[in-house]
Image: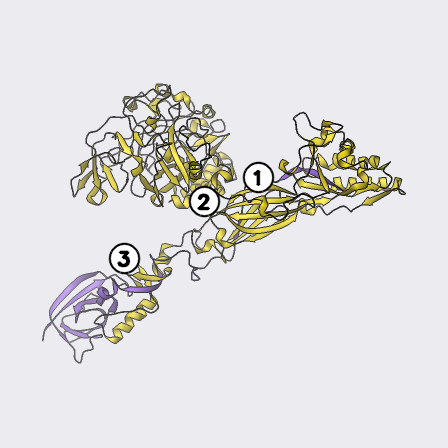
Chain colours: A yellow, B purple
Amino acid sequence: MQINTTVYPEIGHNTYCKWSNQTIDYSANEPLEHSIFYSGSISENVQFCDETNYTYNAQAPNCSFSVAPREIVKGDIFFIKDGYRHFNFNGSWVYNNTYNYNIITEFDVSQFYFDLDKLTVHVYDTSQPDGGHAIGSVISMPFTEYRNKSAEYKRTHLIRDCLHNWGTSQGDSFLKYKNVENYADVNVVPMIRYVFSDKTTLYLPFGMLTNYANLAWQGPYNLDNFTGFGKFSPQLTDIYLAQYPGIGKWSNDWSVGGAAQAVTMANCGKVDNLVIHAGASGQQVSQIIDGYQMPDLTSIDTDRYAVPVFLWGNRWDKRIEAFYTDEYIMRYFASSGLRFKVDNIMYIGYMNANGQCNGDYILESELADSDSANKNITDFTGSAYDANVPYVPPSPSERIDDKELDMSTLMLSGNAGMVHYYEINKTGTATANNISDAISRFDISTIGKDLMRNLISFKAFAVLPTSDVFNNIIHIAGRDLKDDNDNYLMGDVIRGLSKLSLGTIEIPTLYNDYRDYEPYTRIEMFVPFCGWFHLPSWCMGKIITGEMFVDLYNGTCKAIIKASNTVVAETGGNVAYDIPFVAESTGAKAGAVISSALTTAVSAAGFASTPNIATGAAALSSAANLASAVNSNETTLKGVLGDGSNVNGLNRCFIKVTRPQSPNGSTNIPDSYKHEIGIPTMKEVQISAGDGFIQVMDAKVTGTMTAREKQMIVDGFRHGLNF
Amino acid sequence: MSLTVTFANTSNEYYDVNKKYTTVKTCTNASIVYPCDILNPTFKIKGGKIDANAVKDVFGRNYWIVSQTLNEGINYVSCTVDVFSSFKNDLNGSTQFVNRSEKHGNPYINDNSYSCTSEPVSMMYDDPRTVIVSGDLHYVIGVI
């Protein structure tokens, strides 16, 4: 997927982003045009050349050009780089055979694009329990594939895979060292460090600005020398966060570009522990790059622990966030001061007052909405999003540009006419002595003098109805029945339906081929009160949202499940059950009787931390029977205790995906299979050398061959030829 | 009539179209055993066994060597035509309706040839942010 930037001049500050080589003190608010920056020396020898005319020799390193490279001009875009790192932007390669950092003064972001399909996500395990070797390994996958992984997968599987890939023995020793049995308990976890393109390395600047002169590899790495270091996110200041501004190359060889010594808690962040490794002749020399100290140093043997200089991540709430969502990665891009759209979300880079580059986003629909408060947004500096803070997914309504199901589209949307329903909530009964007390204080003119004779139903609901279904107020002797927090205690149900959100679940693909669909993979969904039901195969990879409409009159509910704005399932159930109550013909004793029943019921069931249905209902029944017995000549037990089993189950929705297992343990179909047997194609192809295995059932062959030879060729195609 | 025959080796497989040959020996005084089926010719050369598995560019074709028969200083080399290599120029560039392929395939078409295990694995996913059951009971009474 190619991402084209779209420029919104009316809201943006970086239609032209300036890169500055000036040392800027970001202790004060800076103009937003500095949102892309890098501090370093400028080389005048920056050259551009088309990719096809450029050959790079990594060993020298140098390059040769089949056509003369040209000087950079406005419109060229390149990222921060050094002599042998380059990045493909807009179809052009940028290369500089000096070792200086290069800065372009302006570029037009409207010309910027990058190709998600070519990006690869590398997931690292950062642990170094023996002080010298990373335990984990790199898991690489296309970004587009990573996007489809569920959060659960990223949290758990990547950890396991990283550990296992490194080797069983070392992985085991790591687990023993950490004294953990469950991968999910591993405190040091893999994380995305960089996003690479397929050919080149993309390095993104971090939010720390310093003078290039201070980036010498000796001495100045004292964090105190970095202006504004103390201005990282406050929540990170207690974990010895060390950030080293700069850029560098990724290496799968820890010894290249890594830390020469283990950086322990005692010397964390000190300058002389981080050095540049000048590789042997011909190697790509690397430089120290940003480094964060991730491990929870309070729980491990710090003397044996090293700072993973080449890795970075964030710690949050006593644990390390191991994964980034794709939105986070997009914001990461944007933090370079770029603006682009993905999936109707526009990402914008900005720099906050602390000199941190951040990425934020806004829905495209919001920009187009004349009523949107954010339509003309120009300042993201007040955003809660911070590049140093793990990304928290927004609520579904922010992410999905869907249409709300309108009440008017539903059948039961009116009121109950002359029949009134009243909801008695916990707060109400807490303020009043009990339900009967509350009932006894009803406005007589509203409810009628003889409430007990007019009761027709009494139901216990396991869900909390939304407040909008109630009328404003119930009067008690001329004053409002409110609690100290101004909540209404009892409400007249004015609309039969209460809408509840069932949440959002993404169904992750695994194989990214036919096996993700039926009949191989089956998707089921559970909705509380409604049970399990089947979801169609095309929901795979979609974001599933659900809403439940609860009928407050009779307790039935209807769950409507959508996948990408399309209703895929509708199921029903019951969220309530009947509670028997005592009705009395004379009315004189009814209040006391029902008071007894309700008080018992509420105290037994209503205030339990979880619905104690059976106890509450039994108490009600018992109290009602008792009342009925005492007043046998005057009272009647109405109703029976309802079956509460439907409301005693899982409390939220689940998606269950049942998948087949691959015979080779990998999610990918082996290359050898593709080469020897091929995968279904079923289309017309112009065959060319290099296509590999081709099988044709009825080949059409022309040429000077004899009939027998022709038949041999046709038979060969039927068997499968290798081109 | 003398014939030039180039003996070669190829490491490619039978169904490979674009074979690579390494010339082993070129005989300029070879002859043909008649009658000759050009799909299965036999070449007659002086000398012993030749360490080759193919013959190139005779009759506009390439051949697999089927056998070598030695008799009184003469090597009778029996061949059979390699149609795929011989007519690769007709095959490369041709347009076919392809059933299966290595690089043009659609991964979303069912492939019954690639078996999965009979042990499915279920995974559960949820959105813990939304718990619709509140934990407390709520009561609704109806009054006529």
Please, what is the three-letter code of the amino acid marked with disc 2? Lys
Q: CA distance from mark 3 to mark 2?
A: 32 Å
User: Tag on residue A690?
Assistant: 3
Please, what is the three-letter code of the amino acid marked with disc 1? Thr
Front label number (3 vs 1):
1
Percent position of residue A570, x then y: 58, 51
Percent position of residue A253, x then y: 33, 37
Mark 1, residues whose alpha carbon is within 10 Å: few (<14), some, or many (≥20)? some
Mark 1 = which residue?
Answer: B130
Q: Are marks 3 and 1 on the same chain?
A: no
Q: Are marks 1 and 2 on the same chain?
A: no
Q: Chain of mark 2?
A: A
Q: Quadrant of the C terminus of chain A?
A: bottom left
Mark 2 = which residue?
Answer: A149
A482 in relation to A185, above or below: above
**Who comes first in sequence, dot 3 or dot 2?**
2
Q: Could you say which is closer to the camera, residue A344 or residue A81?
A: A344
Mark 3, residues whose alpha carbon is within 10 Å: few (<14), some, or many (≥20)? few
B38 in relation to A357, above or below: below
> Helix, strand, or loop for circle 3?
loop
Q: Chain of mark 3?
A: A
Q: Chain of mark 1?
A: B
> Helix, strand, or loop for circle 1?
loop
Outermost residue, bottom direction?
B35
Give the image quarter of residue A252: top left
Q: Are marks 1 and 2 in contact (CB under 8 Å)?
A: no
- Position of A287 with respect to A168 (left or right) is left
Q: CA distance from mark 3 to mark 1?
A: 52 Å
